[in-house]
Image (tube, rainbow, N blue to C red):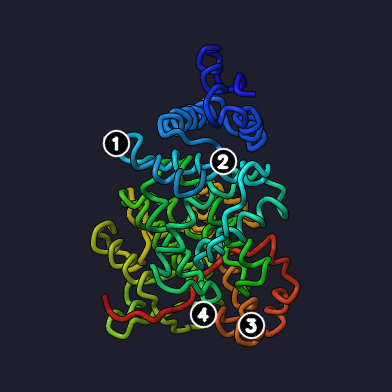
Amino acid sequence: MIEQFLSDPVAVQRMRASPIGSQLDSFAARLTQLGYARASGRDRLWTLSALGRWLRRRHLGMGDLRADVAAAFLTRHSPARRVRRSDQATLRLFLDHLETTWIIPASPSPALSPILQLKARYEAYLQHDRGLSPVTGPRHWFILRRFVRGRFGEGPIDLRGLTADDVTRHVLAQIPSRSPASAQLHASTLRSFLRFLWQTGVTTTDLTAAIEVTRVLNACDQSSPVGRRDYAILLLLARLGLRGGEVVRLELDDIDWHTGALTVRGKGSIRSQLPLPSDVGEALATYLRRDRPRCATRRVFVRVRAPHRGLGHPSTVSTLVRMALTRAAVNAPMKGAHVLRHSLATDLLRRGASLADIGDVLRHQQPNTTEIYAKVDFTRLRLLAQPWPVGGAR
């Protein structure tokens, strides 16, 4: 009933007397069914009230209403202002209502563009597989269209080639400038879409965890010396799978800026040389240039406050990780420094790497140490670690 959205009896009477008035009560009921709030539904009924007056002035009835007539109404009934998207959406919804109730013949369905086909599949997934309201899909798509267009532009959309790097770049570009509530909505919407792609077989890898590791990295306040130091530490854990103790023991001479390599002192005093990813190198260089205090120690990471000495114990790194997980509201089953190392291993296994390869990456001395990753519960434990793009000197 119209009265669900409008309380003015005179306005309600005028609406019902218009050329489309006989269908406004059933349309109002549909708005209620679709979950429209009172203010939003009222706005849509006022648009249809203007449509009714416009039809009467042109001696047109409901049977004359077609997509082209609705388009003419939008462009002519109020030429002094721009056409609102909400008005366009209202008329599309009203025409669909008239077609489904057999008031007017159905319009021939135009061929959908690839992005609209994707939108339709995703909205059907939300409604039928997830049991969500029909209004959820359009709300999600307002966010997701920017992600899809940002990755593929106006060209062909091939989501099979979507990578964790694509997700990370988008999140890094979009999330930091948003309010906490908006950032949370953006991340949860993108996570839902990536889960849809994986569950429907479009992508072969669950990319949702790329959002989580990016949120953990973004939890560092890079406007402060402590935040920039912690950001560099988290990148070493996430990209290279370093242990907390290995981060603590890093020294300035271990970084070869010319070749883009990092020497790591592992268990048993064994030294390994790892490629230095470009983003890790940039974070290290920023910290060393701007924030590391001048002091006698050769350790890379030192206390911000006096006494300026190297971080004392691997537990310091674990505390840093726990704080970042808490700030990012990421509920990981493990809370210490090892969670990101573990994540790198499980991600490599899901990508098809052998246990021997994973053992080499993590520098395990005993093969049976790596066997734990064959039993990993991926749906609970995996946070995505990035691939290793080898970087040069910075």
Q: Which residue is mark 4?
A: 269
Dot 3 amino acid type: Gly
Residue 122 x, y percent position in the rendering? 61, 58
Mark 1 surroundings: few (<14), some (14-19) or many (≥20) residues within 10 A: few
Between label 4 and label 2, give the one nearer the viewer: 2
Between 210 and 117, the residue placed more toward the observer is 117
Q: CA distance from mark 4 to mark 2?
A: 85 Å
- Specify the label residue 352 is tagged with: 3
Mark 3 surroundings: few (<14), some (14-19) or many (≥20) residues within 10 A: few
Against 32, residue 11 (above or below) is above
Which residue is depicted at the point 55% across and 51% down? 189
Is tag 1's residue or tag 3's residue first in the polypeptide sequence? 1
Q: Quadrant of the C terminus?
A: bottom left
Q: Secondary structure at mark 2?
A: helix
Q: Secondary structure at mark 1?
A: loop
* Residue furthest right as drawn: 375
Dot 2 amino acid type: Gly
